[in-house]
Amino acid sequence: MKTKKIRKRFELADYLEEEKFLQVQHKKGWRMVNLKLGFSTYIFEECEPDDYAYQLDFKQQEKDLEEYLQLFEDCGWEHFYKLGNWYYFRKKKSEIPEENVIFNDAPTRAEMAKKVVRFQGMISFIALFPLFYIVPILLNRGEGRSNALLALLSIYGVIMIVLTGSQLRNFWKLNQIIKREEQI
């Protein structure tokens, strides 16, 4: 069976765009079978071009995983992949639009985005915590400080600032999704 790889990066808040990307690929005759996270490489297997709905769900606890997956299977969804806390589902599109989404009401869609925001906040706090230690060291360049250490800490600080920008973008985008869904 033929396979193809596509390198494409989606942030935590880009799950709706990722769903659309996967739907377009399936319509072109390529269904997702794997995702290599390091380089954001999607691996697709050739299939009959068809109109499939793809949905991602964010679930942190696995205590009721069997029941959770069975619920989706009972509604016609195929669980085909898991990455971290993200569960990937697909099914052949229905004529009834409400059947093509896992969350077919606005409050449930908003709650899903809120779960992602809470997780994003926890990750951001953990990632930024070392900066509270690094910044004072960089600002206090007293004697006995190695230039190599200061250079490494500076590089780490720049990387953390870039990642913080990405995290802020995710927060903003997820909050836009929440506001939109709560207005419906």
Image (spheres, rainbow, N blue to C red):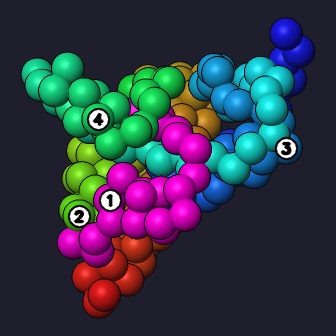
Residue identified by numbered label 1: 103
Residue identified by numbered label 3: 28
Does 181 sit left or right of 99 as displayed? left
- Mark 4 or mark 3: whose residue is earlier in sequence: 3
Task: Using the numbered discs, state the Cα–Cα distance from disc 1 to disc 2 in whole angstroms.
Answer: 6 Å
Residue identified by numbered label 4: 74
Task: Using the numbered discs, state the Cα–Cα distance from disc 3 to disc 2 in whole angstroms.
Answer: 30 Å
* Crowding near the residue tagged with mark 4, few <14, some 14–19, many ≥20 C-alpha atoms within 10 Å: few
Work out whether 34 lies above or below 176.
above
- Mark 3 or mark 1: whose residue is earlier in sequence: 3
- Mark 1 or mark 4: whose residue is earlier in sequence: 4
Residue drawn 77% across the image and 21% down it: 45
Start-end of magenta stretch: 87-107
Work out whether 108 lies above or below 136.
below
Does 115 sit left or right of 22 as displayed? left
Q: Is residue 9 magenta?
A: no
Residue identified by numbered label 2: 108
Q: Are marks 4 and 3 in contact (CB under 8 Å)?
A: no
Q: Amino acid at mark 1?
A: Phe
Q: Are marks 1 and 2 in contact (CB under 8 Å)?
A: yes
